[in-house]
Structure formats: C-alpha cells, structure tokens
Image (cartoon, rainbow, N blue to C red):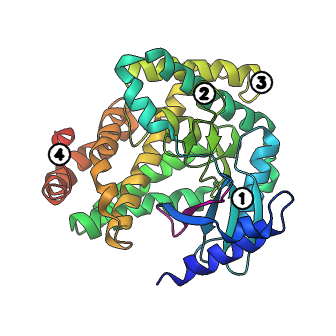
C-alpha cells in the first residue's frame, strides 16, 4: 500500500471540500491517478472530481524536497509574466501540494511530430518560449534568488568527474587529468560569471514547457522551476535550443538565438554593446557547462537513484560537447583528452543502454 499517496489523497480532498463551489460530497468521490515522477524525488498525481474538475497533487517528501522554494519561485515567476501553475493549497510539514492542472501536452511530442510536417509550428513554439524567457529576464526579481556562483557551477561540473568518469566509465583520474579538468572548469565558470546575470529557470526545455489550451503558438505553461537561481543570460536559452531530448540543425539554432538576442536587446536584458558573435560565444560555452553537468547527472540518476532511462540521452549530449567544443580553441586540450582517454571506454559502458552511433 502506498501510504503517502493515501495521505496525500485524503489531504487534497479535505482541501477541496472547503473550496467555494465544490461540495464535500464531490471531493470525497474524487479519483486519484498517477501522472509521473521526475528526476527528483517528487511524484505527481491527477485528482478528478465527479463534475470533471482536475487538479495536480504533488508528493514532495520534506526530507528530500523543499515546498517552500517551489511555492516561492512559482509566485516569483508568475509575477514576472510566466505561466506557472497556481498553488491552491500546500502542507509544508507533510510535503503535499495541490496545484492547477496544466494537462499533459508537453512541448516535446509536438516538436517531434512537427519537425518535418509543420516547421511553422516549431518556429511558433520556440518563438513563444523565447518571448516568455525574455519576460522572465526583463521582469524577474533576481534579488530573491540565490546566485549561480562559482561554487555551484563547480559542484555541477564535478558531477562529470565523479559520476561519469569515475563511477560509470571506471577511470582513475590522475593528477594530470584532474589539473586539466580544473583549468577547463575554471575557464567555463569565468565565462558564465562574466555574462549578464538574470533569473534562470535552470531546466528550461521541451519536457518542462507545456502547450496550454491546445495552442502551440501561445505562451507555454512552465513547470519544474524550483531550482531557479540568478545566473548567465544564455543558460536557459541554450537549455531550450540545445535540448538534451531533441536536436536541431545549427543554422536553425542560430536563427532562433538571433531572434532571442534581438528581443533581449530591445528589452534591455542585454547591454546594447553585446554583438551577436559575442553572444553566440557565450551561448556555446554556457552550453558546454550545462551538457558536461548533464552527463554527470544522468549517470547519477542511473547509479544512485535507479533511473536508467536517462542514459539513452547521453549520446546526444556528448555529441553537443564534441561539436561545440571543437569550435573553441581554449577547449582543445579537454576535447583531445575526452576523445582519446574517455570515449573509447565510455562507448563500451554505454552499449547496454543505448545505440552509440552518436559517439563516433
């Protein structure tokens, strides 16, 4: 028996029974079904009442997850102009939340379906997502979020060292390799910290953006925002356009990035002196940091948390690192080491999980 689900359901029904327009009888006959889990320790359920109303229930064990942060960022982002689900009730002690239901229409399936058949739909969806991101960066109260500082950037990068190189691939990192990684990470941190600092969602991609009201061109619903920080202005953009779950031709990515650059410049998010080539360099290097981190996170999800499904996405992420790093001479030593000291063993280790053509 799932005790927490039972407690969550009973708590939500009590909350609904007190809401205007919903009687106790309707709430007591509500059904609760599993929606999903995610890469965190949160679980999501959908509650349906007899009269067809739907709500999302969140089980966020308080020893693992911070509902205070979720509620705070949801309101902060909503005030900045993003569409985040309204928090209708919360029990901080138990780690329960009752949310507005945005439905099930994530960006990713529609993007995949529209890739060949409806490129205009894809453009409209990315345009809407970028416009929402500009609103966040222009209006967000950055003083209410923690900084994406050097310590946090380094902690994330070291996930690659430990969970991918050492734990998954089985490498013994000697002093020379550690020095190389240290200098590479310092370079990437320096570039991230030199960028304009804005509110950062930190996971702004196709699995955390939702189509609302069956309108792909409308402003997206935004979820999974609780880890928001103040950091580099290109971080969320590169999460969106160099998504770990869907890849686009570089020419198209650059076209979208130019569109964002124009909007962000017009809204005063970017200094007027920020030319597009410099912006794209920042975009590239921020993407390297993110993708290096993601490789480590996906391995940690597999090895520590028993969630191997993310391993199938590692080849795409590695391909981003190889392709983008090759465009920046400062990363040549790291790229050479990665190609020759890491990837030969990584291919063998990844083979049980995925097809590895992307690692060639």
Q: Nearer the viewer, mark 4 or mark 2?
A: 2
Name the image quarter holding residue 302.
Answer: bottom left
Q: Residue at x 80, y 65 (%)?
A: 23
| 3D distance between C-alphas at marks 1 and 2 | 34 Å
Question: Which of the two discs, 1 and 2, labels the residue nearer the N terminus?
Answer: 1
| 3D distance between C-alphas at marks 3 and 4 | 42 Å
The magenta stretch spans residue 48: yes
The magenta stretch spans residue 155: no
Residue under pointer 2:
215
Q: Residue at x 64, y 41 (%)?
A: 221
Query: For the residue labelled by badge 1, is the local secondary structure a helix, a strand or a loop?
Result: loop
Residue 216 image position (x, y, % from top left): 56, 27
Query: For the residue labelled by badge 4, is the local secondary structure a helix, a strand or a loop?
Result: loop
| 3D distance between C-alphas at marks 1 and 3 | 23 Å
Front one among 53 and 40: 53
Q: Nearer the viewer, mark 3 or mark 2?
A: 2
Residue under pointer 1:
146
Q: Are marks 1 and 4 in contact (CB under 8 Å)?
A: no
Residue under pointer 3:
267
Q: Residue furthest right?
A: 20
| 3D distance between C-alphas at marks 1 and 4 | 38 Å
Provide the residue span drawn in magenta. Answer: 39-50
Residue 185 image position (x, y, % from top left): 45, 52
Q: Nearer the viewer, mark 3 or mark 4?
A: 4
Residue 224 image position (x, y, % from top left): 59, 53
Residue under pointer 4:
356
**Classed neighbour count for the residue bearing mark 2: other residues with Cα under 10 Å, few (<14), some (14–19), many (≥20):** few
């Amino acid at each position: 028996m799932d005790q927490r689900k039972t407690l969550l359901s009973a708590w939500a029904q009590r909350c609904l029974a007190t809401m205007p327009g919903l009687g106790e009888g309707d709430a007591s006959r509500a059904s609760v079904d599993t929606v999903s889990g995610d890469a965190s320790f949160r679980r999501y359920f959908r509650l349906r009442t007899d009269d067809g109303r739907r709500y999302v229930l969140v089980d966020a064990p308080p020893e693992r997850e911070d509902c205070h942060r979720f509620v705070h960022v949801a309101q902060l982002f909503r005030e900045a102009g993003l569409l985040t689900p309204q928090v209708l009730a919360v029990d901080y002690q138990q780690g329960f939340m009752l949310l507005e239901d945005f439905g099930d229409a994530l960006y990713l399936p529609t993007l995949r379906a529209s890739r060949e058949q409806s490129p205009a739909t894809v453009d409209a969806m990315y345009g809407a997502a970028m416009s929402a991101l500009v609103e966040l960066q222009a209006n967000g109260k950055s003083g209410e979020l923690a900084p994406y500082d050097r310590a946090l950037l380094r902690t994330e990068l070291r996930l690659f060292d430990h969970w991918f190189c050492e734990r998954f691939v089985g490498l013994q990192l000697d002093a020379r390799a550690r020095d190389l990684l240290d200098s590479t990470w310092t370079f990437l941190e320096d570039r991230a910290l030199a960028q304009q600092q804005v509110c950062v969602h930190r996971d702004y991609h196709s699995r955390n953006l939702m189509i609302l009201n069956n309108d792909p061109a409308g402003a997206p619903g935004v979820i999974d925002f609780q880890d928001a920080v103040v950091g580099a202005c290109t971080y969320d953009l590169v999460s969106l356009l160099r998504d770990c779950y869907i890849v686009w031709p570089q020419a198209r990515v650059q076209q979208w990035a130019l569109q964002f650059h124009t909007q962000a410049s017009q809204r005063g998010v970017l200094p007027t002196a920020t030319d597009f080539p410099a912006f794209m360099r920042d975009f590239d290097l921020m993407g390297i940091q993110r993708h290096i981190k993601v490789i480590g996170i996906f391995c940690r999800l597999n090895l520590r948390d028993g969630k191997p499904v993310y391993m199938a996405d590692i080849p795409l992420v590695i391909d981003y690192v190889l392709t983008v790093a090759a465009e920046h001479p400062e990363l040549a030593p790291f790229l050479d080491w990665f190609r020759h000291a890491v990837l030969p063993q990584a291919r063998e280790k990844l083979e049980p999980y995925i097809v590895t053509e992307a690692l060639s």
